[in-house]
Every structure is written in C-alpha cells, then in structure tokens.
Image (tube, rainbow, N blue to C red):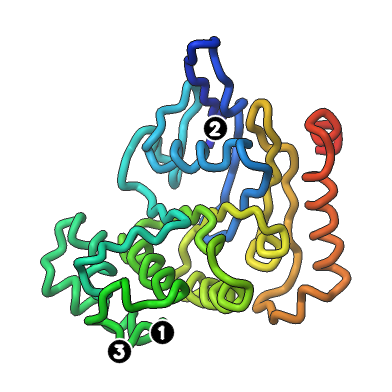
Amino acid sequence: MEDVSVTFQTADGPFHALAPVTLNIPRGRFVSLIGPSGCGKSTIFNVVAGLQSPTRGRVLIDGIDATGSIGQVGYMLQKDLLLPWRTVLDNVILGMEVRGVPVAEARDHARPYLQRYGLGGFENRHPGALSGGMRQRAALLRTLLFDSDVILLDEPFGALDAQTKAQMQEWLLKIWTDFGKTVVFVTHDVEEAVYLSDDIHVMATRPGRVIAHIPVDLPRPRPRSVVTTPGFVALKQRCLALLGHPADEESEAA
C-alpha cells in the first residue's frame, strides 16, 4: 500500500477513516495488524481486496497496480460463510469454481488437501455437522485454493474457545509454511499476533493509522512453549504498551 487514505462523506461532514498509510509487505511473510476497534484494520482489508476505493493512494501486488481490482487476493472473515446446502468438499472448491475450474477437476484437486489438513472423512458432510474449528479449516482451505498469492484473514479465530484457537493457530502455521502464501492477519489478541507473525503493525484511531512496526525476531518453527520465553514476553509487552497509550502518546512512541 502506498499512501492510502479513506475519507467518507457524512451528514456531519467528512469522516477520515484512514490517514495516509504505507505498508510494504514482502512476499511470503506473515504480517499481523493489531489495534483498537475503529482503527481502520478492516478498511485496509477492504481496500486491498478491491471492495473499497481509497480516497488517495494505491495498492501494488508484485509491483502491479491492483487498486480497486476484485479477485486479486483471498479474503476470509471471522464468520466462515460456508454455504449450508453444499458439502464440505463443494464449499472448499467454491473459489475454484468462480475462477472457471470445472467442478470434477476442482474436486479432484481439493480432495488431497482435505486429507492432508484434517478434513479427511468429512468431504460429504454439511457445515451444520461440523465444529467451529472444522468449519474454520474448511473456510481457510477454500480461501487458499482460490489461488491468490496474498491471503487476508480478518480475525478468523476470534469466536473460538481458547483450546480450539491454540490448535488452529498451529494448524495455520503449518498450512502457511506448506503453501508459501503472503498472509495479512487481523487480530485483537496480542499473544496470537506475536506467536504467528514475522511482523506486527500497531494501529491507532482518530484517524486510523499505523503507529509502529514491530519485527518478530523469534525462530521458526515456534513451539507453544515459546510464549513463556523472555523474548516473546518482551514483544508482547511492547505491543500492549503501544495499545495502552492515548493516541498522541502512541504517535510519539512510534
């Protein structure tokens, strides 16, 4: 993103949802955005996905201007949005169908992924028969098989219980490593952001803006026990300190 800002016109005058933001995300990185509600995280996602036109600035993917282009990235919301009348397999291939892949070919392509990533034996089940974690697996596989190099994940584990969330975080790291995609991840959970990410961008409100970039210099693969190490705790405390300051102090800290 280069100098992207978003302003909405309201009855009370212009509302600056997003101040000029520049983000450079290297290919294959796992990057998290954290910040309070209303800081512009979802607005950034909507701009990158082509669902919201920026007031100024542009979006580049591999150096090509993708501003306003729909279908250039995979986008998964917190709610899985699986279609209840379709089986798990047919939900997973939906993005491939949209891209014009014949159904039989798409099913053949997707089946090995269901087996590899914990959905084997559930191909012919419907979403209503799945747990929350299994539904999120299906939704994430659907997003990955859309075959975009950039994946946007908007709080995908926010509604899960703590144990299921921890399992899904480890599952996500495995699948990210296997697929080699660039992932941009929104979360309110600071520990989750540190555990998953290569880089964290901290945001603030009024208007939405990025106030700090925090590299996560922790080796991979990361066992769950990493959360108790001094390096992890220090990164978490730095993020929390930035989030805990009023907006003016946050800008100075950045």
In the picture, the quarter occupied by the C terminus is: top right
Q: Residue at x 35, y 47 (%)?
A: 72
Q: Which residue is mark 1?
A: 118
**Relative to the observer, which residue lies in front, 119 or 252?**
119
Element type at mark 3: loop
Q: Which residue is mark 2?
A: 2
N-terminal-most mark, 3 or 2: 2
Where does residue 81 sit, x and y in percent of width and height?
34, 58
**Relative to the observer, which residue lies in front, 178 or 207?**
207
Q: Please name the amino acid that badge 3 sits on.
A: Gly
Residue 150 appears in the picture as rendered: no
Q: How far is mark 1 from mark 2, CA to CA?
A: 38 Å
Asked if 235 appears above or below 53 in the picture, the reply is below
Q: Which residue is mark 3?
A: 121
Asked if labels 2 and 1 touch by Cβ distance under 8 angstroms, the answer is: no
Where does residue 84 sit, x and y in percent of width and height?
25, 65
* Residue that protrudes farthest toward the bottom in the picture: 121
Within 10 angstroms of label 2, few (less than 14), some, or many (20 or more) residues? some
Asked if 54 appears above or below 156 in the picture, the reply is above
- Picture quadrant where residue 202 is located: top right
Asked if 174 appears above or below 189 in the picture, the reply is below
